Amino acid sequence: MTDKIREQEEFSRKCAITAAVAADSKKATDLMVQHVRDLIGVTDYFVIATASNSRQVDAIIDEIEDQLREQLKVKPTHREGSSDGSWSLLDYGDIVVHVFQPETREYYRLEALWNDAPVLDLAKEAGLTEIPYSDRIAKMLGK
C-alpha cells in the first residue's frame, strides 16, 4: 500500500468518525460506522444512524455536514432524502452517511446487507460510550 493510499484511508476514517461524533451530538441512536471498502469498492465507510423524527433527521444531517466542512474542509458531492423526512443521505465519495427514522431503518436494514463489513468501535475510536442501541442493533454489535 502506498503512502498516498494509506493517507487517503486514514482521512476517510477520520471523516467517518467526525460524522459519528456529530450525529451523537444531536442524539442519534443505533449509531454505527462500517468499513465497507473491501466489500463494495465505491466508498470506504458507511455511517448509519437513527433519528426519532424528520426534524431530528434534518438536524443530524445538518450537523454532520457542518462539522465535516468546518473541521476537515470537505463538502458532500450529493445530498438526498425522502420527501417524508424518514431518510436522508450525504455522499462524500469516501464515506456515505445514512440517517433513518426507526421504521425506515428497520425496513431497509442497510447494516445487515453488509454484515461482513468490520464495524468501528466508537467507544475506542471516538470516545462515544453512551450511544443508545435498539435490541436488534445491540445484538448485531455484540453489546
Image (cartoon, helix red, strand yellow):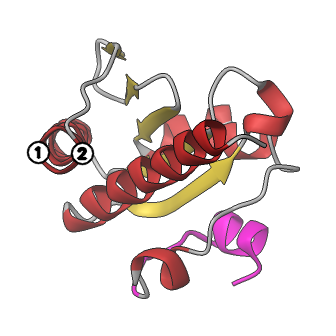
Q: Position of residue 16 (x, y in %)?
A: 45, 50
Label 2 packing within 10 angstroms: few (<14), some (14-19), many (20+): few
* Secondary structure at numbered mark 2: helix
Q: Position of residue 17 (x, y in %)?
A: 42, 59
Is residue 88 in sight in this rendering? yes
- Measured along the vertical axis of the image, is residue 5 above or below residue 26? above
Which residue corresponds to mark 1?
70
Identify which residue, 60 or 108, lies in the foreground.
60
Identify which residue, 99 or 123, lies in the foreground.
123
Q: Residue furthest right?
A: 116
Q: In the picture provided, is 18 more to the left or to the right than 5?
A: left
**Is 113 part of what is drawn in magenta?**
no
- Measured along the vertical axis of the image, is residue 8 above or below residue 90? below
Q: In the picture provided, is 54 more to the left or to the right than 45?
A: left
Q: Position of residue 51 (x, y in %)?
A: 33, 50
Q: Give the quadrant of the C terminus.
A: bottom right
The amino acid pointed to by label 2 is: Leu
Q: Position of residue 99 (x, y in %)?
A: 40, 40
State the residue at coordinates (23%, 36%).
Answer: 54
* Secondary structure at numbered mark 1: helix
State the residue at coordinates (83%, 37%).
Answer: 38
Disc marking residue 72: 2
Q: Give the quadrant of the N terminus.
A: top right
Identify which residue, 126 or 132, lies in the foreground.
126
Q: Quadrant of residue 73?
A: top left
Asked if the residue under mark 1 is in contact with the one under mark 2, i.e. CB atoms within 8 Å, the reply is: yes
Q: Which residues are magenta?
A: 130-143
